[in-house]
Amino acid sequence: MAEFDFDAVVVGAGAVGLACGYALARRGLVVAVLEAGPIIGEGVSARNSEVVHGGLYYPTGSLKARLCVQGRRALYAFCDSHKVAYDKCGKLVVATNAEEVARLDGILAQAQANDVEGMAHLTKAQALALEPELNCDAALISPESGVFDSHGYMLALQGEIEAAGGAVVTSTPFEGATPLEAGGFEVRAGGDEPTVLTARRLITAPGLSAQAVAATIEGFPTDTIPKGHYGKGVYFRLTGKAPFARLVYPPPIPGALGTHYRRDLGGQAVFGPDLAYVDSLDYSVDPARAPEFYRYIRKFWPSLPDGALAPDYAGIRPKLHGPGEKQPDFRIDGPEAHGMADLVTLFGIESPGLTSSLAIGEEVAGRLGL
């Protein structure tokens, strides 16, 4: 029987890669997580809303629907056991016109089909009793939604992997892999000290570089690699007191959940993200986008003062659909998809990937027969 340096190598130390490593470590495997950047979780995982999603919108039977609900339940329990900060503040999906009111029934039905707990329809008076500064004609409440400390979460995952004898190695880009004749993989890692190691199993979860990483695996069928797109979203921060205790979301827009409100764990109000397709990893925030944010936010918060929004940060989502195309499901491809044993490749893990991460890790372990 072949000897391997590691039972598994995971490419990418964002929330999803670390959760995959954690799921394997819990099964007694010795895992190495390779991260190209200088710190864990500095890509997609560091540039999002830190929202714990309820699982309301995703199509029945989809990976997103199942893994978001499973992942959310597991995430709160993990945060409790690892003392990771969170605020299960709840979320309001608000309708500010007749067309949006009609959409709420469909969202509620989908949430109930997805087994989301506690969902309820609120009249205008009921919504305003919860959030007096809100403007809406009706709303839905999702009491299981919240916000959490995503970096604290990732540090806890890293700690679990290392406590189980594994390693999380930064500044170590994955440069390719070759299947070994007796099974497993030879993995080439770069950085200041390039190395070659062997692993019984290989999981790729590198977010924005998922397509490029898959293409460096010798023998991987490139015709199964989906086309990737960069979906940029910017955030603006409120300079002033946060107006709402709960998350506030409009109904979803095509391809995303839309510009929403959250009060972060520090008590500050943040709005975003919007969605614009871009060709490069540009994280600048153009102040010229502010007028559109004012217009959009004032639909549900009319008293937003002039000059109160300051450019904050931007994130880029690894989308599998372009402008005008239907939003697809997560891609978690095991041997049944690409024909290569002991390999799982992840593509398009955008929202609700952070919420779903623990369940994604369990799903990956299952695809590996563990």
Image (cartoon, rainbow, N blue to C red):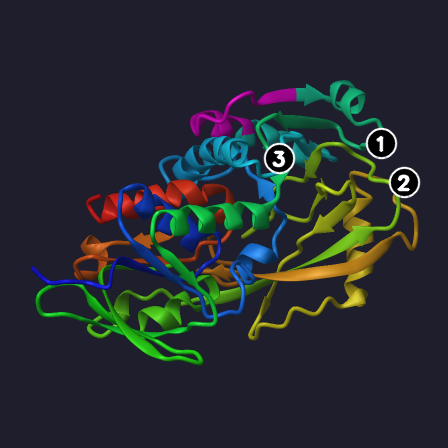
How far apart are the two marked residues, 3 and 1, measured between alpha carbons?
Answer: 20 Å
Residue designated by label 3: 146
Look at the image and say whether residue 110 sits in the magenta stretch. Answer: yes
Say the numbered circle drawn on residue 303: 2
Q: Alpha-carbon distance for marks 2 and 1? A: 8 Å
Provide the secondary structure element on which disc 3 rests. strand
Q: Is residue 285 above or below residue 106?
A: below
> Total label count?
3
Going by the numbered disc 2, the residue's amino acid type is Ser
Alpha carbon separation for disc pair 3 and 2: 24 Å
Q: Is residue 197 magenta?
A: no
Q: Nearer the viewer, residue 42 or 81?
A: 81
Q: Earlier in the sequence, mark 3 or mark 1?
A: 1
Q: How many neighbours does mark 3 have within 10 angstroms: few (below 14), some (14-19), or many (20 or more)? A: many
The magenta-colored residue range is 108-121
Which structural element holds mark 1? loop
**Residue placed under numbered mark 1 in the picture:** 133
Q: Is residue 329 visible?
A: no
Q: Upstream in the sequence, badge 2 or badge 1?
A: 1
Disc on the earlier residue, 3 or 2: 3
Q: Position of residue 199 (x, y in %)?
A: 23, 63
The residue under label 1 is which amino acid type?
Answer: Glu
Residue contact at pointers 2 and 1, CB within 8 angstroms: yes
Q: Nearer the viewer, residue 236 or 201?
A: 201
Residue at the image position 51 percent from the left and 60 percent from the top: 40
